[in-house]
Image (cartoon, rainbow, N blue to C red):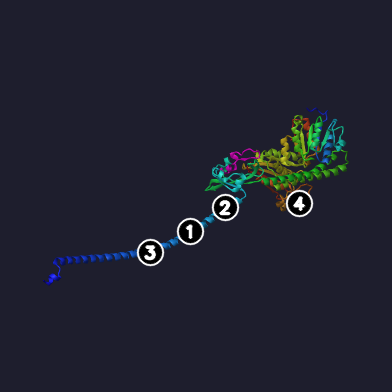
Amino acid sequence: MDKKTIFSTSNDTIFKLKILAEEKESVRRKLVVTANMLSLKAKQLAATAKEKENVRRKLLITAEKLKKSRETLEKKVLERTKSLEMARAKEEAILLSIGDGLIATDKIGKIILMNKTAEKLLERKSTDVVGKVFYKTISLEDERGVVIPLEKDPVSIALHTNTTVATNTTDPIYYTRKNKTKIPLAIMVTPVILNKKVIGTIKVFRDITNERQIDKAKTEFVSLASHQLRTPLSTVNWYAEMLLAGDVGELNPKQQKYLEEVYHSNQRMVELVNALLDVSRLELGTFTMEPKPTDITELTQNVIDEQRPQINTKVINFSFSSEKIPLINADPKLLRMVVQNILSNAVKYTPKKGKIRMSISLKDKKNVLLKVTDTGYGIPKNQHSKIFLKLFRADNVRDKDTDGTGLGLYIVKSIVENSGGKIWFESPKENRGTKFFVSFPVNGMIKKLS
Amino acid sequence: MKKKSIKKKTILVIEDERPLLEAVNAKLEKNGFGVINARSVDQVFDAMLETNGLGVIAARSIKQALDYLEDLEKIDAIWLDHNLLGKENGIDFVKKFKANGGRWNNIPIFVVSNTEGSDTIKSYVNLGVSKYYVKSNHRLDEIINDINLSLDHPKEKTR
């Protein structure tokens, strides 16, 4: 036997082993590669994991930040909401505490907002009326219970004329409540203008029941005062008249004279009381103005006729001329007071055989001018500024033999100015006469909703 | 129908102030003619009644006035003050008076008062009184003259 055969394997086997070994090596190499790859992958994974961890950490931080941001944002939103709420609450508080009812409409009169006071006054919920046309939803009446027509509705007028419209306390508009009581309202409607166009209106109104009651009380007070003051004056008047007429026996000349002084003095008292009552009515605001189309020329002629006796007694050269004047919208009672006072002043303060010129003319078709010129005592320059003051009588007439209450011009000025007119005078030198001017707007005493 | 002058005309005067009432009575009587029988409750009135004058019936309150109207045959005109004794005033009187209707509606009412409230005056005008005078602004004989004219020419209204 040989060594080869004992210890050696066949060549085939060696070959196979070699191949196997090579295969193993190959596999081993592959495994190594794989292992390397795996190791790499593992590293990669680890890296990825690390990255992920990083990202996760970053995300966490971001999440934290976002959370904080959100909290801040929420806080801000809350604050903003609060301040908006505050603003709204303030607005509402303002609207509420206006104490007046407030209704806002759009440009065709549809209600867009109504405040609580309005809800209470009108007994309607704003949710019921918003979106509805004001005129159709809320019915207003005049004093006699006649529904106010659309043309006279304040909102409607404001929308059409682009002006603020207001009612007055003497001619209020009424609203009937559920319990059938009618409450008088003072209404003011203002158009809201944007870019020169009317886009809606704001209407503010309030219940003036109290004010009307106060007015009524004031009027009654003046009325009562007038009655109490005038009664004894009437008694003296009439008894003096009867005595002077000889009803209870003939008087001797001296008795006649003395009695005439009594009568005359009493007449002055009557005039003073009348003037004081006019003044208190003016000041208490209870003077009612009832304008109607008035012929100022006719009225003036009337007043002149009344003054004729005095004009003739003083032998005054009197003339009156008037242009053709259209009817002016004026309260005839008050207009008469004005004309009468100016004329009687001219007659009173012009000495015998003096001259008085009275004229009425139309100025620029808009105004009527009444002018009275006399050749009388005039008004001293240093007293010009006081002439219209209550109870003021200029020095130069106080020592002449004239009567006067000192109230006439005060009353006349009030009436004229309240009617939208003007009064002024010229008297450059004492004893050289005076010129009085009164101008009235043709269109009317007062522009008020009637 | 108003007959001329032979029959005395009767005025019912309703005024709460005694001195004024007496003054009006006196003047009316001085301006009248003929004799009239009148019932009177008021003593002062008794003392003033004369044979030659307008018969004057004086009343100080509405109740008195209406009582007289019930009894009397003929009243030609009424002189009425606004403020009267009792709770009711001249306006209440006119309302009650007009409510009786008939012949009474033609009797002219002259309101002579010292109140000047425009509401008051308006009420009287609306109730159909003939005229409203503010007492202290008119002479007594002026008012009586107006009444006379109005009775003689009932269709013409004095303004």
Magenta residues span A138-159
- Say which residue label 3 marks: A53
Among all residues in the image, which is located at the extreme bottom?
A: A3
- Nearer to us of marks 3 and 2 is 3
| Sequence-earlier tag: 4 or 2 | 2
Chain of the residue on which disc 4 is drawn: A
Q: Residue at x 80, y 32 (%)?
A: B69
| Sequence-earlier tag: 3 or 4 | 3
Q: CB of mark 3 within 8 Å of CB of mark 1?
A: no
- Nearer to us of marks 4 and 2 is 2
- Say which residue label 4 marks: A395
SS assignment at label 4: helix
Which of the two residues, A422 or A418, is positioned nearer the viewer here? A418
SS assignment at label 2: helix
- Say which residue label 2 marks: A91
Q: Residue at x 53, y 54 (%)?
A: A84
The answer to if A149 sits in the magenta stretch is: yes
